[in-house]
Amino acid sequence: VSSPNGAPSVAVLSSVGLPSGRDATWVAEARNITVAVMLPDNHHKYPWALPRVFPAILMAHEDLHVKHGLLLDRHINILNYSTEDPAVGSCAESRAQVVAVDAKLYIRPDAFFGPGCVYPLASVGRFASHWKLPLITAGGPAYGFDKREEYRTIVRSGPSTTKLGDFATVLHTHFNWTSRAVVIFHDLRQDDRPHYFLSEGIYLNLKEDMNITVEAQPYEDDYKYYKDLITFMKERGRIVYICGPVETFLNIMKLFQSEIQDPENYAIFYLDVFAESLADRKPWQNSDSDWANPIQVFKSVFVITYRPPDNPEYKDFQRKLHAKAQRDFGVHLEPSLMDYIAGSFYDGFVLYAMALQETLADGGAQNDGVTGLVTTDQKNARDIDVNLWAMTNQETGEYGLVAYYNGSNKEIIWSQTEKIHWPNGGPPLDNPPCVFSTDDPSCNDGHLPVLGIVAVGSGLALIIFGISSFLIYRKLKLEKELAGMLWRIRWEDLQFESPNKYHKRAGSRLTLSQRGSSYGSLITAHGKYQLFAKTGYFKGNLVAIKHVNKKRIELTRQVLLELKHMRDVQFNHLTRFIGACIDPPNICIVTEYCPRGNMTNDWISVSNSAVKGMNYLHNSYIGCHGNLKSSNCVVDSRFVLKITDYGLASFRSSCENDDSHALYAKKLWTAPELLIYDRHPPQGTQKGDVYSFGIILQEIALRNGPFYVEGMDLSPKEIVQKVRNGQKPYFRPTTDSRCHSEELTILMEGCWAEDPAERPDFGHIKIYVAKLNKEGSTSILNNLLSRMEQYANNLENLVEERTQAYLEEKRKAENLLYQILPHSVAEQLKRGETVQAEAFDSVTIYFSDIVGFTSMSAESTPLQVVTLLNDLYTCFDAIIDNFDVYKVETIGDAYMVVSGLPVRNGKLHAREIAGMSLALLEQVKTFKIRHRPNDQLRLRIGIHTGPVCAGVVGLKMPRYCLFGDTVNTASRMESNGEALKIHVSSATKEVLDEFGYFDLQLRGDVEMKVRTFPLLFVFVKTE
């Protein structure tokens, strides 16, 4: 082979595997050299089979004298032995051992060529190292032969898995795959396991040299394994190496196509060293199965092969090899990459001859072999070149050579004409975030336990269910709010005062302008003050009312969303939206009323509050103001500046003529890019709001009205036209450093920049103003106002917190009361009413006790008895919550329950008590006594139906008690019953028979103190 720049590489063959000392002298003196060739016979299965390799060794022997001029004075005897088990047609380790020992004892060979299979080579290699005989092979790719202390005399003149691992290391470094990889190999648990040993170098090199988490998974010729492989790839890695027969690889890819939804996130490397899948340059055409869209899935598939020699000698060698194999062995060989193995044996034979011919120094020698220039490393393993194939034609799916790996230089040479077409535009991530169970690249290769998978899956399912439920709840809540129209105010609900009183009290006042003329259609001069907002009363509170000049409002979904989000706005520096009236012709917007006018004494205080309000507005659903000006900056009763007249773009309209003075007066705060519109969009823009804020700052600083220009008396129309023209120098208000600070000048000029992109946003303005606020001294008035605002906010929060605490305690007390008395009775007592005794015509009463409780109590401590009863009745209480019953009381081991009062339920009371009794009886059979776990409680139950009288008895610890003969009879039913049975009176049976699904057995007559019952029944079950 040649190096990338065309210069020949240096070939090295270590002399460790050759005879040394006395043995070397013996070889030099001997005239005959014996070589033992030990290889299998099956040329269909093994690239190093005798029919393929032995002709190459004979050709090398023939070329020694004529072509290479080596060993001219010596005769070489070449003997071949089969290491194959003829019964199964595979390599046999035991046979190789016997052949090697026999050869050593009887023919005394000077060198071994082969075996090629890993297991036989491992055994014979140990023998050869012990005998100090060289063993040359182009097979045996296993990683373990790199251990020089164990295999000292092995020389590998062919490819090895270690070199494939070196290629994978360089490939991962190039694409920055440094975290995870997966190796999948075919394994039948028999024969020589070629695919395992071929992929072993990739697994170990990535794991040991790059510290990558590499996980391996074998598979067999069974479709059920393929399903597990796809799951393994999903859960373990995105960079996948597959080594196995072509047909199994295509079966895996077929399932991969149907199971994997994102093949573009995978990079799959098929280890096909002899290029069997590239016969037609389309790997999937080797399969008989139908592919839906193979090009799509194979875009992520790469093929790794050995690089065939490209020297002319190799082509001639192939032709002679095939002819000799046909003549000597009767075997017909087709040109393939398997000939590369035969050529490597040829080169190994020539290298051995050179080693005998010359005295080798450390550093070795070089040889131009039939497979190119041969170089070996310090472990006597040949450096090989590797090809990387990818789909280069995206339309036909044809594969092309995109790169090859130079084993001598350990670098990848990328093609200048062909390139990789990644489906995502670039290589996939080997460890994408939030995909695998751990992000730690140094973790072990252990599998996640099944319980862990179930727990994670259940957790994810719960999270997804919770998120979905939350989103659905929010959606339903939003729709309910939109449909409810909580913002809507009827015109009749607004109350107005007399005009005289209105002029004295109503209206937010402007003290900003001292020029005597102020712009804005809503501003009307009234002496010292300027009135611009009407007021009225809504639910007793003074509110600001802004009339909208529209005949009607169409309530589209967009308008409803606007109104809903306006109602949701709650911020200290924005006026609160109370509602809107859409009753024609009285269409108006109702907002919080701010009676203190505008505070303009300190520009930092004003701008700080305004900036906070605008910054919140820009980050909210509303997005921007669209009509910001000084008259929309008002102060409430707590001296807090607030922004008003924002949002609800669909409500805004212009009623002035196109050329009116008021219309141009309102546009003095409008940004130049919005003035090009005759009527600019009512929602405005965020950068337009920044421009308006700059005009407000100039208005505050110079106190001469909006857009004051020194030395010029211009009308609003003239000012707007000059700003709209946009001619340099841009027309802007006057700044005067004598009246305000330099920092304010910088801020104003930045806000009214001609290019909107050069204007700062309110987030940056907020930081700038806060910095100036820290540098400057704070006035006493500002401190007072700040403390008042903070105190008011804290007081509101405290009241809210205390109210919530009171409500929580009230709820706890009510819950406790409801546990002592029936809900309806408790409500009467809460209202201060006297609870009158009440007669009920028909209820069903349940009594139960524990048989043998007295003797059990005598044998137990009081604490154990209390624990037993608490456990039992806690269990009972949980069960009766599922039925329409009321627990009356417990006395010792007796438990009393009633249904049909205080809320009557017709004849359902008998059914509820019967169902409850069955549930309690079933539960008591499995109940465990803590201090006597081997004993079973024997519950005895009695039920009777009849009239009772109920009422509250006592003032301290009041009890809801039942009176009447029905109570006594139910108690006698229980005391005369049998353990673990439910005794029912004939009155109860008559009611239960109406339901038709209770099974009762006749017990007979029983004498009681109350009366004689001719018929008693035992409750068995419900059907």
Image (cartoon, grey):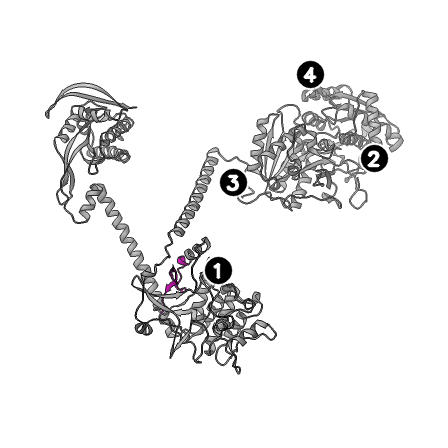
Tell me, for residue 155, which label it has, or none. Answer: none
Name the residue nearer the viewer: 364 or 336: 336
| Three-letter amino acid code of the residue under disc 1 | Gly
What segment is highlighted magenta in the picture? 566-594
Q: What element carries label 1?
A: loop
Q: Is residue 884 magenta?
A: no
Q: Which of marks 2 and 1 is in front?
A: 1
Q: Is residue 377 visible?
A: no
The reply, left or right, for residue 182 in relation to residue 492 is right
Q: Which of marks 3 and 1 is in front?
A: 1
| Three-letter amino acid code of the residue under disc 2 | Glu
Q: Residue at x 71, y 17 (%)?
A: 86
Q: Identify the mark nearer the N-term, 2 or 3.
A: 2
Label 1 sits on residue: 623
Q: Is residue 455 visible?
A: yes
| Three-letter amino acid code of the residue under disc 3 | Ser
As drawn, 104 above or below 368: above
As drawn, 727 above or below 426: below
Q: Identify the mark nearer the N-term, 2 or 1.
A: 2
Q: Which residue is drawn at 37% across and 65% down?
A: 545
Do residues under tags 3 and 4 come within 8 Å of each other at their CB atoms? no
Do residues under tags 4 and 2 come within 8 Å of each other at their CB atoms? no
As drawn, 868 above or below 89: below
Do residues under tags 3 and 1 come within 8 Å of each other at their CB atoms? no
Name the residue nearer the viewer: 216 or 803: 803
Tell me, for residue 358, which label it has, or none. Answer: 2
Q: Identify the mark nearer the N-term, 4 or 1.
A: 4
| Marks 3 and 1, how far apart at CA | 41 Å
Q: What element carries label 4?
A: loop
Label 4 sits on residue: 87
